[in-house]
Image (tube, rainbow, N blue to C red):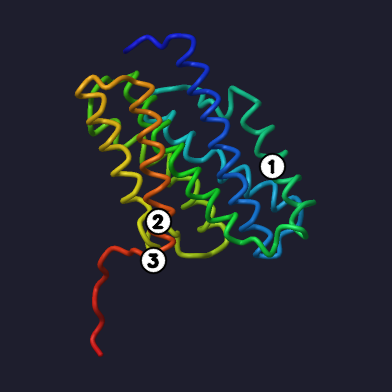
């Protein structure tokens, strides 16, 4: 297991909290769209914000998961849910905000999950990929299932694919000794931009063609 320096610990912690907030926003938006009350909004915001990170921690052997041992995660998701509840009347015309936060959360959580796995398992591509992708898509899948929708990861544009490509870039940069900070930032940027561009131009993976 690689030792984390204090600056790296602070960076990862701050980004993990920010990604939690970004996904909590998407959970709150989705709950409001489905006519939930404030309790439902807070619950869905919290579940969306912490589910991916909790799965990641279980995979890398972090017990209890940070979402349970560190109250700041839930404080952020609850606060986000309450803030969105009161601000939504002014924000409801800006549905694209939901999609942008979802893309941002995807980029941050993908590489945060990958970095945690890297510092536990080293340059183990399977572990890095599994931790990164589960961190990225876990909360969104749970969010959509809770409101009885097909998870966006299975049907819309590049989602899990964008996450995988970001992880691949992160892994390659670390493999050629490009530097941890550089690999982290570039991985996040690549994942987020891929997701945003895919939404903008409606890029989708091939699907089964039904008989006419």
Label 2: which secondary element: helix
- Chain-order first, disc 2 or disc 3: 2
From the image, which quarter does the C terminus lie in? bottom left
Q: Residue furthest bottom?
A: 212
Report, in whole angstroms, how far the alpha carbon at label 1 lies from the one at label 3: 29 Å
- Chain-order first, disc 2 or disc 1: 1
Report, in whole angstroms, how far the alpha carbon at label 2 lies from the one at label 3: 8 Å
Front label number (1 vs 3): 3
Label 3 belongs to which residue? 202
- Chain-order first, disc 1 or disc 3: 1
Front label number (2 vs 1): 2
Give the vertical position of 55 relative to 92 (above or below). Answer: above
Horizontally, is 190 left or right of 144 in the view?
A: left
How busy is the neighbourhood of tag 3: few (under 14 within 10 Å), some, or many (20 plus)? few
Q: Position of residue 179 (x, y in %)?
A: 31, 19
Query: Badges 2 and 1: C-beta atoms under 8 Å apart?
Result: no
Residue at 65% x, 26% y: name it.
71
Label 1 belongs to which residue? 80
Label 2 belongs to which residue? 197
From the image, which quarter does the N terminus lie in? top left
User: Which numbered circle lies on residue 186?
Assistant: none
Q: Position of residue 105 (x, y in %)?
A: 50, 43
Residue 73: which quarter of the image?
top right
Q: Position of residue 15 (x, y in %)?
A: 52, 29
Label 3: which secondary element: loop
How busy is the neighbourhood of tag 1: few (under 14 within 10 Å), some, or many (20 plus)? many
Depth check, front residue: 188 or 84: 188
Residue at 31% x, 37% y: name it.
167
Residue at 25% x, 30% y: name it.
171
């Amino acid at each position: 297991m690689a030792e984390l320096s204090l600056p790296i610990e602070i960076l990862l912690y701050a980004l993990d909290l920010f990604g939690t907030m970004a996904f909590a926003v998407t959970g709150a938006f989705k709950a409001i769209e489905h006519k939930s009350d404030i309790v439902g909004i807070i619950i869905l915001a919290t579940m969306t914000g912490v589910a991916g990170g909790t799965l990641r921690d279980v995979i890398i052997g972090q017990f209890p998961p940070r979402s349970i041992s560190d109250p700041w995660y839930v404080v952020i998701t609850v606060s986000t849910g309450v803030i969105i509840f009161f601000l939504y009347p002014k924000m409801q015309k800006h549905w694209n905000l939901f999609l942008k936060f979802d893309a941002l959360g995807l980029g941050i959580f993908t590489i945060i999950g990958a970095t945690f796995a890297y510092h536990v398992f080293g340059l183990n591509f399977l572990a890095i990929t599994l931790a990164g992708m589960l961190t990225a898509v876990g909360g969104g899948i749970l969010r959509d299932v809770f409101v009885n929708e097909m998870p966006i990861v299975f049907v819309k544009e590049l989602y899990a694919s964008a996450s995988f490509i970001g992880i691949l870039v992160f892994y390659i940069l670390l493999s050629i000794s490009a530097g941890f900070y550089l690999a982290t930032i570039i991985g996040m940027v690549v994942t987020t931009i891929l997701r945003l561009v895919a939404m903008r131009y409606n890029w989708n993976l091939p699907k089964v063609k039904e008989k006419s």
